Every structure is written in structure tokens, then in C-alpha cells.
Amino acid sequence: MSINSYENYPLTWRPDRKKLHRPIYQSLIKQLEADILSNKLQKNTRLPSQRELADFLDINFTTVGQAYKLGLEKGLLYTSIGSGTFVSPNAFTSITISSDQVPDHIIDFGLVSSFDECNEMIAPFIQAVAQNHATSGLLSYREPLGTNYQLTIAKNWLETQGVYASNDQIAIVSGVQNGLAVTLAALFSPGDRLAVDRYTYSNFIELAHLYHMEIVPIDFDAEGMLPELLEQECRKKEIHGIFLMPSCNNPIGFQLSAERRQQLKEVIAKEQLIVIEDDIHSFLTTYNQKTPLPSFQQLLPEQTIYLAGMTKFICAGMRVAFLVFPEKYKQKIQQAIFNINVKTSSLDAEIVTQILCSKTAQNILETKTNYTKQANERFDTLFNLPRPTNPLPFYRHIAVRNDLSPETIEQAFLNKGIRIYHSHRFTTHPQHDPFIRIALSSNPLEVLTRGLEIVKKEIVHFQR
């Protein structure tokens, strides 16, 4: 059937044939993404069948099948047996979650980078490691958890963060996200319940869902998760683990106080929960506090998996993190690392190791501290909002109305040249106190200021 036969046929999606180019199935997906972003296609919309769309566009139906398969892989679509193919409820999020989809003219306040202008300090170390005659020894499958030297340097750096472990209790993994995947695969099972802050790291939520685990949101105040609510939830039904970001909650920015850590410790110890401690911001908070707060790894060493990523400290593209585990979990963690990674890049690990051994590490720390201070000051100048309990957060949030859809708000800012993330990305259920999160560390300060001025002008349309 030719395209003309469907001129008056009520198809739910009508791609423009003139915009198709080879490979056609990828071109179709680009149009699908554009129509989702522009709200032409709403979530749960049933798409035309493969045959209907193929006839409408006058192409082979197997090409449409390829496109729909790619849409499923990218999280844009889902299928229901006997009913057809539908636009995923999370399609908008799937499209906008990564920076490679953001045009150059968009100021990105969504993805949290780490002052990429500092990356020029890293380049000499990449060159030096590449030119070292011993580098060829890093290119094999040997020492999948890291070399003994790399682990020793990791151990020494972790001690500056108040984390104490032997080399045998440390593994070098490919970033915190990878470490979280390893931990969930090693120590938990489908159906296990994991307590988290009511608003928490969106990628952990998605990862837990991928492993078919249940997220249990626990409310918080300015000092962090409320221990009495955690205990109440444990009484209702067994909870197996708890995910915490003690130094700087993402997306709220609060830091768990010393008193709150002790209160949570008591509940966690009583309920024998496994703690997953994502302390990716500890490098900044520890440096700027006279008395560093104790980590959960220090408070509950036999129950805590501790993760310290180098992506925010050293370089966003350097996917290296240190995973610290109790001796009793050693075999399970190592097996999971082998099954998921085979091994972490020894080359990346060596570059990070050399940086940590140098004065450059301190220079990076001081520079990023200065940038973070300036970024927060620029936010404070434009918005009369209190800072979270972490005095130097990488992100801030601004309340918005709860009668507008997250997609509407995100798209409105995108139309103005700003990508922000709505709070719905950081929770599992609709909440009464929605907001937008602003990443302060993803742009040079002059670009940050220009973007914040646009947000200041536009935010009034989304507040009461």
C-alpha cells in the first residue's frame, strides 16, 4: 500500500518520509525522539503496527521492526503482548539523560560534570603514563582489582577521607555507577528491598529496578534521613540494604550531620542492613571541614560497602572508583567484578594513581573548591534561597508548582536554551514538593551565570 493510501487514515504517529535517510531505521528513531521531546507523542501512546507504518512510509516492514527494536533497547518504547508497541512512560527521561543528545547551544544544568576546565591539569599524566616503558604491563588481564601499588595509593588516599581498610579489602572499579552495579549483583537478589532518601540519585533507582529490586523511599529533614521512619519501615516488611550519600545528597545537597549518622547507625546495626555508601563528594567536604564527619564505613565497617569515585575529584571521563568491602564479602564482590567487568582499565587506574601521588591532586582540589564556592555565590546572588547543610554542594534546587507535568517544565526550559532536571527523576513516586535541580559544576562560571539569569527570568512561570 502506498503512502497516499493513508492520507486520511488515523495513524497515531506520522513520520515525515522526506526526512528519512539511510540507515532508515536510525532515521526513524531520530524522528521518534524529536516527536517525544516536542510532546507530539505522549507517554503510553500506541504506535502504528510495523505493517501500517511500513505501508504509510512505503518502506520494508522489517525496517520498521529494526527501528522499533532500537527504540526498545533505548528505553523509548515498550511492548504489550497482543496489544502492540507503546511510547514508554520514561521515554522523555531516556532521551534527555545523556549529554550527547544536547545541542552545543544548550546550557546543560542537567548532567553533573565536575568543572571540566580542570582537565588540562590531567593531560600531562596521560602522556607520561603512555610514554612509560612499564605501561605495556598494564594492558593484560592480570590483576583485575588493581595492581598492589595502585591499591596502596588508594588505601593511603582513602585514609585522608576517614576510611580504613587493607589492600585486600579494596577493589578499583570503573566508576561509582559500575561499583553500584557490582554491589547489587554481588550482595542482593531480585525482590530485595532497599531503603533510600525520598529524593536520591536517579541512576541508583534505575539500577535497582534493572535488578528487579524494590526501592523504599524514606523521608528526610535538613540533617538527612529520619531514623525513626527507617525503623518504622523495617518493622512493616524486611529491608535488606540502605543506600546513602552522606557527604552530599543528590539532588537535595544536604550533608548527614554527625548526630544523624549515629542515630542511623543504631537502626542499621539493629536491623543488620547492608549499607551502600556513595561518598563521591567526600573529597570536597572533607577538605573544607575542620573535623571530618565519620563515614559509615568507619561506624559500621562489617556492614558497609564504601564507594569513592574519582570522576568528580579528578576528571569526569576518568572512570575510576575505589570500592571498599568487609572481608566477609570479598569472594562475592570479586566474583561480581569478574562477571561484570572482567577487569577495570589498568591504564585509567594508573593515571589516577600517578595524579594522587603528585602535587596536582592538591591543585585540583583547591581549584575545584574555589570554583564551587564561586558557583554557589553566583546562585545565591540571583536566588534568595537557603543553602543545604552541605556548604559547598555541586547542585541547588528551586521549588516549582506541582500541577504542571515534569515534561512540560523541562521542555519549556529546553526551548529557552537550558537543560534542567525535574525532581521526578530522583524519586519513585509523585511528591508534594517538586523542584528543578541545577548542576553548578557543569559549565564555566561565565556560562553558569548566563544560564542562571535565564532560569531566574523563566522560573516565575512555574511558581505560584
Image (cartoon, helix red, strand yellow):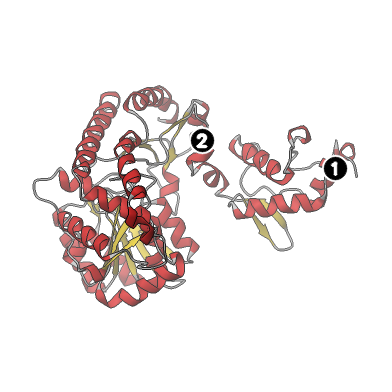
Up-down: is 186 above or below 64?
Answer: below
Amino acid on which disc 1 is placed: Asp
Q: Residue at x 52, y 31 (%)?
A: 103
Element type where label 2 sits in the image:
loop
Ranked by sequence position, the earlier of labels 1 and 2 is: 1
- Residue 457 occupies quadrant: top left
Q: CA distance from mark 1 to mark 2?
A: 31 Å
Q: Nearer the viewer, residue 287 or 123?
A: 123
Up-down: is 125 above or below 377?
Answer: below
Which numbered disc covers residue 299?
Answer: none
Q: Residue at x 32, y 57 (%)?
A: 134
Q: Is residue 176 visible?
A: no
Up-down: is 274 above or below 345?
Answer: below
Q: Position of residue 391 (x, y in %)?
A: 20, 40
Total residue callouts: 2
Q: Nearer the viewer, residue 378 or 181?
A: 181
Q: Which residue is mark 2?
A: 102
Amino acid on which disc 2 is placed: Val
- Residue 373 occupies quadrant: top left
Q: Position of residue 195 (x, y in %)?
A: 34, 62
Q: Dot 1 surroundings within 10 Å: few (below 14), some, or many (20 or more)?
A: some
Q: Is residue 325 visible?
A: yes
Instruction: Give the left or right position of residue 342, taking residue 50 as reference.
Output: left
Q: Which residue is mark 1?
A: 58
Q: Residue at x 37, y 43 (%)?
A: 433
Q: Nearer the viewer, residue 132 or 254?
A: 132
Element type where label 1 sits in the image:
loop
- Locate the C terminus by quadrant: top left
- Locate the N terminus by quadrant: top right
Q: Position of residue 44 (x, y in %)?
A: 63, 49
